[in-house]
Amino acid sequence: MNWGYKIATAIAVFIIIMLSMVYVAFKQTNEMIDTNYYQKELKYQSYIDASKNLDRISTDTILRVNESSIGVQLPKVLVEHFMKGTLEFLKNDDQRNDVLIAFSPDSNGMYLLDKTKFALGTYMARIQWNSDNKTYYREQTIIIR
């Protein structure tokens, strides 16, 4: 094989690689984690303040994943005057698997979720609740296996 065929083969291989990269790029989904990202970004200072409210009371982990469930353990100090709470589980790679739950803990501050509601993978969990006319907030990454 002479050098002309080698150059033509190299160009053909390069074109095939480029076309396959274009094909893969078109198959990608470019979803944002939040649908109302810009509106939430404008209110982000309130999330920072709510997170600081919680940090003053406890820096412990709120979510614990075990083999059959996901447990939410709120600090006992905040359970007595608990008003309302929301749990958001955002799956980074597929927005269809996001889970939004309104929750209310028991008298010990515990709330359990069944793991079968969740797809396998990594979630960004956002916990927000009101107690004593203050808002509390925590973000935590969890892995469902």
Image (cartoon, helix red, strand yellow):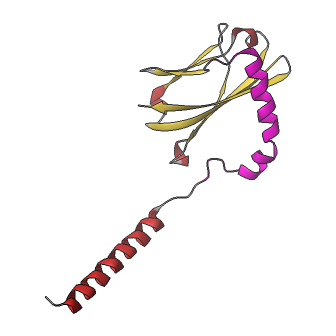
Q: In this view, does 58 lie above or below 25?
A: above
Q: Residue furthest right?
A: 133
In the shown orientation, is residue 127 left or right of residue 41? left
In the rendered image, residue 3, in percent from the top left (x then y), is placed at: 21, 89
In the rendered view of the protein, which quadrant contains the N terminus?
bottom left
- Where does the image place residue 47, in percent across and percent down from the top left? 77, 34
Q: Is residue 49 magenta?
A: yes
Residue 23 higher or lower than 86, as above or below:
below
- The stretch in magenta equals 32-60
Q: For residue 98, what is the image quadrant?
A: top right
For the residue pair 13 and 124, the one nearer the viewer reads as 13
Furthest-front residue in this view? 3
Pick the front one: 71 or 42: 42
Please provide percent x and percent y for residue 48. 77, 33
Could you tell me which residue is drawn at 66 percent across and 12 percent down?
109
Q: Which residue is drawn at 43% across and 37% down?
A: 120
Q: Is residue 12 found inside the magenta-colored segment of the image?
A: no
| Residue 99 in picture, x, y percent from top left | 58, 37
Is residue 73 depicted above or below 92 in this figure? above
Left or right side of 86 for 13: left
Residue at horizontal 66 percent and vertical 47 percent from the top = 34
- Location of the C terminus by quadrant is top left
Question: Across the whole image, how many numbered discs are drawn on residues?
Answer: 0
